[in-house]
């Protein structure tokens, strides 16, 4: 998932017994991967097409859109392109991009594949500027405050669950090289990034991780990465400062 749409999965507090069966076998539901499609959002176009459906390509061709376009804003019907802002001014385009990001963070967008072309600069500035850093800081601070407010049973069943990608480890360097979401997500390319085991820690998550350990929580690490990537993931986590956990659960 793009990091700006999945700041954290930090507040999953699970009972230890829910993660371990008496036989020692994992009997956990498979977590879905983020939903990606080849639908593109184009500000100023009212065309809607979904290249991921059986008739998406035909619909896109009939409307003049390429690859399926979902208009954001009030553009003319038929033939909107990635450079067509319709009647959306540059000032309004920034507002639309902010609204699009908020809708994505609230999980109120239909399946999508790329950042709207007109929002590339907006997303880059958000990711590399103060806003994203502050978002991470505030969420981690609130999570730490919540952790401190709890009275632990001290029976070994007080658990804190962290996700890996864009929670403990930042994939921002990867997305910086792939247009900050302007490129369609490529699983093969992302696997190459994972093989480098070079993702840096999300610093605020590292502090939270140490805080919950010091409070007495058992830490579990849950990820949608494959079992084949266990060693790479472990190496990357260790090098980024995450040394201790009860279990690392992969697909």
Image (tube, grey):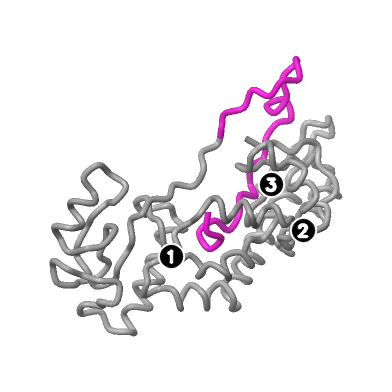
**Screen quadrant of the C terminus:** top right
Q: Residue at x 85, y 49 (%)?
A: 243
Q: Residue at x 56, y 51 (%)?
A: 188
Q: CA distance from mark 2 to mark 3?
A: 11 Å
Q: Residue at x 51, y 43 (%)?
A: 33
Looking at this rendering, what residue extends furthest in the top direction?
23
Residue 163 is situated, as x and y percent measured from the top left of the image, at 65, 47
Give the mark, 2 or 3, whose residue is nearer the N terminus: 3
Q: Which mark is residue 181?
A: none
Determine whether, in the image, residue 102 is placed left or right of residue 201: left
Residue 234 is situated, as x and y percent measured from the top left of the image, at 78, 46
Give the mark, 2 or 1, whose residue is nearer the N terminus: 1
Reading the image, the residue beneath label 1 is 101
Numbered range of the magenta stretch: 1-30
Reading the image, the residue beneath label 2 is 206
Residue 72 is situated, as x and y percent measured from the top left of the image, at 27, 67
Give the mark, 1 or 3, whose residue is nearer the N terminus: 1
Q: Secondary structure at mark 2?
A: helix
Q: Where is 78 relative to 190, above or below? A: below
Q: Where is 211 relative to 15, above or below? A: below
Q: Depth check: 127 or 219 in front?
A: 127
Reading the image, the residue beneath label 3 is 162
């Amino acid at each position: 998932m793009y990091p700006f749409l999945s700041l954290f999965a930090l507040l999953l507090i699970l009972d230890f017994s829910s993660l371990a069966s008496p036989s020692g076998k994992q009997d956990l539901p498979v977590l879905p991967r983020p939903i990606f499609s080849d639908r593109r959002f184009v500000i100023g176009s009212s065309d809607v097409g979904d290249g991921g459906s059986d008739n998406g390509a035909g619909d896109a061709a009939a409307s003049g859109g390429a690859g399926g376009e979902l208009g954001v804003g009030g553009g003319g019907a038929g033939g909107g392109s990635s450079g067509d802002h319709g009647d959306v001014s540059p000032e309004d385009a920034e507002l639309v991009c902010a609204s699009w990001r908020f809708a994505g963070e609230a999980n109120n967008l239909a399946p999508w594949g790329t950042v709207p072309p007109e929002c590339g600069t907006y997303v880059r500035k958000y990711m590399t500027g103060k806003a994203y850093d502050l978002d991470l800081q505030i969420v981690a601070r609130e999570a730490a405050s919540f952790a401190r407010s709890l009275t632990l049973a001290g029976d070994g069943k007080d658990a804190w669950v962290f996700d890996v990608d864009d929670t403990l480890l930042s994939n921002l360097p990867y997305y910086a090289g792939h247009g900050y979401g302007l490129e369609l997500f490529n699983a093969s390319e992302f696997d190459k990034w994972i093989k480098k085991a070079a993702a840096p820690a999300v610093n605020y998550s590292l502090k939270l991780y140490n805080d919950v350990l010091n409070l007495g929580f058992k830490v579990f690490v849950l990820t949608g990465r494959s079992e084949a990537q266990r060693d790479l993931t472990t190496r990357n986590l260790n090098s980024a400062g995450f040394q201790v956990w009860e279990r690392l659960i992969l697909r």
